[in-house]
Amino acid sequence: MRTLGIFAKQPVPGRVKTRLAADWGDERAAALYDCFVRDLLSRFASVGDRRVIGFAPNADDARQWFNAASQSSTSAEGWMLWPQPEFDLGGRMANFFETWTESADHRTILIGSDSPSLPAEYLEQAWLLLETNDCVLGPATDGGYYLIGLRGTITDFGAPFRNVEWSTAGVLAQTVKLLKQHDLSLGLLSPWYDVDSAQDVVTLAGHLTALELSGTTNFLASTRQFLANR
């Protein structure tokens, strides 16, 4: 069983993309994040065997928003909804893997919603790496990671997440140290970028322009339209 999870927040102004909002304002930053989420749900609607949205906050209006967004932008297989529990980020990720990795032959990967241009082939490569490794990581260029995956043979799903200083440039290094301490083998993907700041948006816009010039036009439709009109 190959499971893809995505952690995402309801795009409420003032509660998402706070670094970007410092330059753009709450409403505009949330509107761009809304596009990110919709594009990711659309792009990855058919990958793997099972797809799960780990949504936040755990509230009825957030569930309704994600239910509508997933139904309007996915294939027939669709997405399952799973509310993130009231833990810190490490606890929420550990709980996600504990919930969705039920047996030894399960391979579960988890991404965030800050990398809308993440190549789909990276997900396939992650599942392949989990055939022979306990864990797979996709390093982000800011020092964190855009993807983590675990296979069902692991006995302690919390091991990679304990005492990590989240939202710092040391996340990847601290996670690798934990993997070594617990004797867990690692498969590594190529680096990719998150979009958190105004400068990151410039990078994304340039990337989308280059993709269009190279002939890739049906890609990140919502994000592309938003940036064209900004």
Image (tube, rainbow, N blue to C red):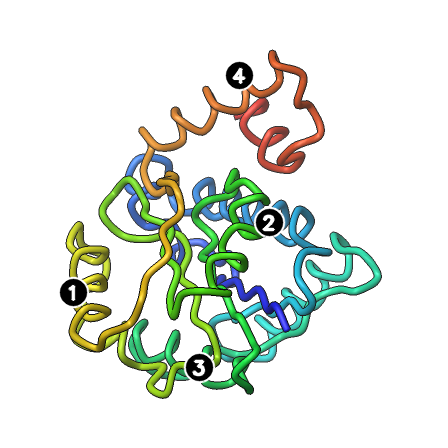
Q: Earlier in the sequence, mark 3 or mark 4?
A: 3
Q: Secondary structure at mark 1?
A: helix
Among the two numbered marks 2 and 3 on one chain, the one whose residue lies closer to the N terminus? 2
Report which quarter residue 65 is drawn in. bottom right
Look at label 2 and name its amino acid.
Answer: Leu
Q: Quadrant of residue 227?
A: top right
Residue at the spot of label 4: 210
Local SS, label 2: helix
Q: CA distance from mark 1 to mark 4?
A: 37 Å
Alpha carbons under labels 1 and 2: distance apart: 30 Å
Amino acid of disc 3: Thr
Residue 99 drawn at (x, y percent): 51, 85
62 relative to 36, above or below: below
Q: Which residue is mark 2?
A: 40
* Residue ID at (79%, 64%): 77
**Residue at mark 3:** 153
The earlier-in-sequence mark between 1 and 4 is 1
Q: Which residue is mark 1?
A: 177
Q: Is residue 111 left or right of residue 186?
A: right
Q: Earlier in the sequence, mark 1 or mark 2?
A: 2
Separation of residues labelled 3 and 1 (CA atoms): 20 Å
Mark closer to the observer (1, 2):
1
Q: Secondary structure at mark 4?
A: helix
Does residue 84 appear in the picture of this structure? Answer: yes
Q: Residue at x 31, y 66 (%)?
A: 185
Is residue 129 shown left or right of residue 60?
left
Q: Inspect the image, locate mark 1, and give the three-letter code of the amino acid beneath it.
A: Lys
Q: Position of residue 132 (x, y in %)?
A: 45, 65
Q: Nearer the viewer, residue 45 or 24?
A: 45
Q: Say which label, 3 or 1, has the lower sequence index.
A: 3
Q: Amino acid at mark 4?
A: Ala
- In the rendered view, would you say 11 is above or below 211? below
